[in-house]
Image: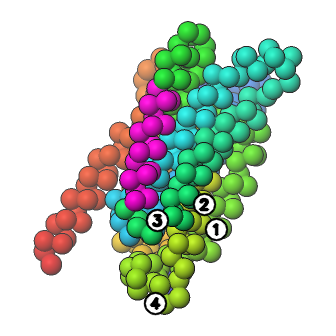
Amino acid sequence: MARRATVYLTLTVLTALSFALSLRVGAGDLGDAGLRDVFLSLRGARALACMLAGSALGVAGVMVQGLFRNPLASPDILGTTAGANLGGRVAILAFQPLLLATDGAVSPDVLLPLGCLLGAAGSLAVLVFFVREESDSVVLLLVGFILSSLFLSVASFVTSIAQESWEVGRAVVAFALGSVSGTSLRVIALCTPLVLLGTLAAFAWGRTLDVLLSGEEEAQTLGVDVRTTRTWVVIWVSVLTSAAVTLAGSIAFVGLIVPHVLRPVVGSTHRSLVPAAALLGGAFAVLCDVGARSFPTRAEVPLGVVTGLLGAPVFLWLLLRERRGERDL
């Protein structure tokens, strides 16, 4: 217990330091008194968006890996991430026509979250149907893979159409690669309740997921309604991933490596992993955003590129270490 408390304290300090570092790093000089407040507000919004998106993906990764009893699972495999990504691209593409049709009444701060939520909801509806009709988790994985492939193909088509306008095409590509540069405080305010509710739900379902780790048949004999558990976990993972995509676009590996890093430190129980994953996921995303702003390039490096560059080697190292440990046994 003392070790776990130390880990939580360390992660809290890391999260606070990453947020403070994010306020200090970026274009513009904080020594300019006239522009200091502007720079701090912009950087603060970016840091909050990254922290919420990283936390959402970290918690979603814990839930997915617990549901499928597989440490290689990630929130992407359910297809809701691709659905939210498609919805966001369609929202960006439709913004200008809707703006003209409604005489300026449409706000991008509302349209983008709505598009991501609708895209995730469409994927979620298909998933829930198959969850209720099928009892095999492999079928759920196959459906998620097919949905991801379908939505990514349609999203690529939307991106190609968006290239007719330079500004729209640039916005769609930036969203697809992962970016928090255009995230507003209104979007953050809309997504914060979703992340908090999803995190609380993950904590509430933690003990049930612990029982599920022993196998579906064993869990049923212990009184767990596996189908209901699977349905609600899929719903809350979809809520978390749609919020993350709304805030930061597509950022890879966060939901995959964060639970991996934490299990040797805090253990495998989900109620221990969920708060730790929320903290580490948020800190990791913020630090990746700081790295994206620190590259010596004229254009900003997308956040999703940085998380991929850092996350892939870390995951391969963790996987290799785990394999070596199994061989030693």
Kindly identify which residue carries mark 2: 236
Mark found first going from the N terminus, 2 or 1: 1
Image spot of residue 222 (x, y percent): 48, 90
Secondary-structure class at tag 4: helix
Crowding at mark 4 (Cα within 10 Å: few <14, some 14-19, many 20+)? few
Q: Which of the 4 image quadrants contains residue 109?
A: top right
Single out the residue that lies furthest toward the left.
Answer: 328
Kindly identify which residue carries mark 1: 201
* Amino acid type at image mark 3: Glu
- Name the one closer to the observer, 25 or 199: 199
Mark found first going from the N terminus, 2 or 4: 4
Dot 2 and dot 1 residues touching (CB under 8 Å): yes
Alpha-carbon distance for marks 4 and 1?
Answer: 24 Å
Secondary-structure class at tag 1: helix
Kindly identify which residue carries mark 4: 221
Look at the magenta stretch and give its main secondary structure.
Answer: helix
| Mark number, residue 297 | none
- Name the one closer to the observer, 133 or 263: 133
